[in-house]
Image (spheres, rainbow, N blue to C red):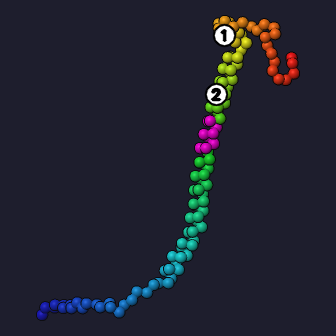
């Protein structure tokens, strides 16, 4: 005799089944989120402070560079002013233009006490 297994498949009808929410799973998820929330907030605060520190550092470096450039420009301009207003240079430039020193009585002081 041969042994033949017969199987009949019967379709399962799940018409009356309803899915229920697992309250424990929701509570575990809420507890997990609440546990990670302070850590995430601390990380975000740290990142914001770090970004602000880097931004302030770049701004400070730019201002330091600008100050150094302005100081150098001021030094250069003062040297040019001192060179251009030297009495010997002014006298030589006036002589080239044909100007003569003023005679006594040609200079009049305006305002202030007479010298």
50 on left or right of 86: left
Q: Is residue 75 above or below residue 85?
A: below
Q: Position of residue 97 (x, y in %)?
A: 65, 8
Report the residue marked by disc 1.
Answer: 93
Check whether the beta carbons of the residues at disc 1 and disc 2 lie within 8 A of each other: no
Q: Quadrant of the N terminus?
A: bottom left
Q: Quadrant of residue 46?
A: bottom right
Region in magenta: 58-66
At 58% across and 52% down in the image, what residue appears? 51
- Secondary structure beneath dot 2 equals helix
Residue 86, relative to residue 39: is it above or below?
above
How far is disc 1 from disc 2 in space, using C-alphas? 26 Å
Q: Position of residue 20 (x, y in %)?
A: 43, 87
Query: Position of 104 compared to 93: left or right?
Result: right
- 13 drawn magenta: no
Q: Which residue is mark 2?
A: 73
Q: Residue at image x 85%, y 23%? A: 112
59 part of magenta stretch: yes
Q: Residue at x 18, y 91 (%)?
A: 6
Say few, some or many: other residues with alpha carbon within 10 Å of mark 2 (under 14 / 14 to 19 / 20 or more): few
Element marked by disc 1: helix
Magenta stretch, overall SS: helix
- Estimate the x, y position of residue 23 in percent, counting from the top left: 50, 84
The residue lying furthest to the left in this view is 1
At horizontal 69% and vertical 7% (from top left) the residue drawn is 99
């Amino acid at each position: 005799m041969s042994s033949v297994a017969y199987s009949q498949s019967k379709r399962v009808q799940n018409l009356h089944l309803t899915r229920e929410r697992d309250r424990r799973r929701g509570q575990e998820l809420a507890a997990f989120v609440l546990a990670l929330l302070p850590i995430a907030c601390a990380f975000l605060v740290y990142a914001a402070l770090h970004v602000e520190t880097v931004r302030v550092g770049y701004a400070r470096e730019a201002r330091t560079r600008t100050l150094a450039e302005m100081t150098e420009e001021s030094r250069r301009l003062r040297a040019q002013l001192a060179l251009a207003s030297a009495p010997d240079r002014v006298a030589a430039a006036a002589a080239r233009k044909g100007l003569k020193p003023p005679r006594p009585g040609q200079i009049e002081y305006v305002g202030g006490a007479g010298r």
